[in-house]
Amino acid sequence: MSLRAFNSSPQVQRLNTFPIFMRVEGEAVVVVGEGDEALAKARLIAQSSAELKIVAKNPEPALEAWAGENGVEIIRESYRTSHLFGVALVFAASGGAQLDARVAADARAANIPVNAVDRPELCDFFTPALINRAPVAIAIGTEGAGPVLAQIIRSRIDRILPPALGRLAQLAASWRDAVERIVPRGAARRDFWKSFFEGEPARAVTAGDDEAASRAAERLLSGAPEKGHVVLVGAGPGSEDLITLRAHRLLMEADVIVHDALVPEAVVALGRRDAERIYAGKRKGCHSKSQNEINELLVELGRKGKRVVRLKSGDPLVFGRAGEEMAALREAGISYEVVPGVTAAFAAAADFDLPLTLRGVASSMVFTTGHDLKGGALPDWARLAIDGATVAVYMGRSNAAEVAQHLAEAGLSPDTAVAVVENASLPHRRLFHGTLADLPGLESREDLSGPVMTIIGDAVAGANFRHSEPIARREGVESKLERTMR
């Protein structure tokens, strides 16, 4: 490629094609072709209300099957100019240079816009990568320069758009006339629609409650203040690309983000730049806010009409004290919802290629904290470990010896496999392996400063130990796990 061919000028780049949306409802659109190219264009056009026809004398089986399933007419004839009479758009998708050129020439002679697949020099228009949330549509085009790039961009945008966006747009259309009559133009109307698309009506549509959405829109129209809403969001185990698409979208919409100490800055930074951020602490031994203070804070923000994301490490319903926060919000009449996250046990298992359940070995799981074994009484779940359950111990480093002692007293073999992960899912994670007998050595490892997850059970023996190091070595003794690894 010549250096001249690549325009790196900082000046504003001008498009050679102008993006528009063409009305095709009830209009005829013709695709000429028999194979994969024709099928791809037919699928694209079928997302519209156009009357699609395919000209294919010998359609390939996939094209024929798709047309039959979707009620699309196939004209089983060799192409001729008359096939273009009364047509709004034409797609030349035969795969043959001569036939595509002929179709393009006939279309231009009849003043019909034409697209020839993979032949940009013959195209009057280019088909975009399409995101369909009818009546909302987003089209990404590259003027034929990079169709794969357009698809990559489409997939990234598609991930951040709620599936119910089209229904929300339809609801907005039904209120449009009333808004224009009642709400003054300018800032007031913009504020109304912002509250409509990001506030209570949007939440109700996402929840599938169209009646509640209409009631919320009516309240907005009456001038009632917008209600606050709190979302308990699972931030995942640490890596920012392990949060859910819904969590990311809600972070981008939040007015206030209340986050715990274990939530990395990279995850918090996914929120709106102008969102207020409130650090709630909750790191072991260093609580900047008590749980009651956090509950009161969430209620206060909700009463002020704020959209709040309460960002919790892992999953909010797994040792996240979400129950207390939900109870406080219910009692105060503040609406809330829960967005699950990837809990640390799953991330630690993934780091170890560790099957948490294994046919014939482990068919159940226990989630617990090391604190559950601090008392004198043995919890009921400890006996499940004897029966083969995989046990995931959260926050288990400082009391690893007690965990090992109590499980051994319950009858769990000292040779039972153990996997330990510090900073699960993060690039700087550390992996350790050993047995129940080795577990007390975890307490003496002062180099472990991050959150630690311990997984115990016979299924752990099936993990991948190539990137882990021993928890502790017992002089002159080779454990069953080490013999298995050898």
Image: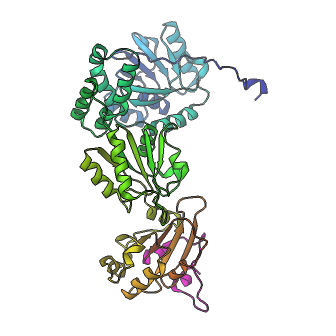
Number of residue marks: 0
Residue at 43% x, 85% y is 405
- Would you say residue 116 sits in the magenta stretch? no
Expressed as whole percent of the image width and height from the top left, the position of residue 110 reads 48, 7
The furthest residue to the bottom: 476
Q: Position of residue 193 (x, y in %)?
A: 36, 25
- Whether 315 is drawn above or below 417: the answer is above
Q: Quadrant of the N terminus?
A: top right
Percent position of residue 194, x then y: 38, 27
Residue depicted at x 50% and y 36%: 274
Quarter holding residue 25? top left
Is residue 360 visible in this depiction of the protein? no
Q: Position of residue 6 (x, y in %)?
A: 73, 26
Q: Is residue 473 magenta?
A: yes
Q: Nearer the viewer, residue 408 or 43?
A: 408
**Is residue 406 found left or right of 113 in the rendered image?**
left
Q: Nearer the viewer, residue 356 or 311?
A: 311
Name which quarter of the figure residue 382 lies in: bottom left
> Which residue lies most toward the right here?
3
What range is drawn magenta here? 457-486
Residue drawn at (36%, 32%) of the image: 165
Q: Is there any visible trace of residue 440 in the rendered image?
A: yes
**Type of colouring:** rainbow
Q: Quadrant of residue 49?
A: top left
Residue at point 74%, 24% (across, down): 5
Q: Quadrant of the C terminus?
A: bottom right
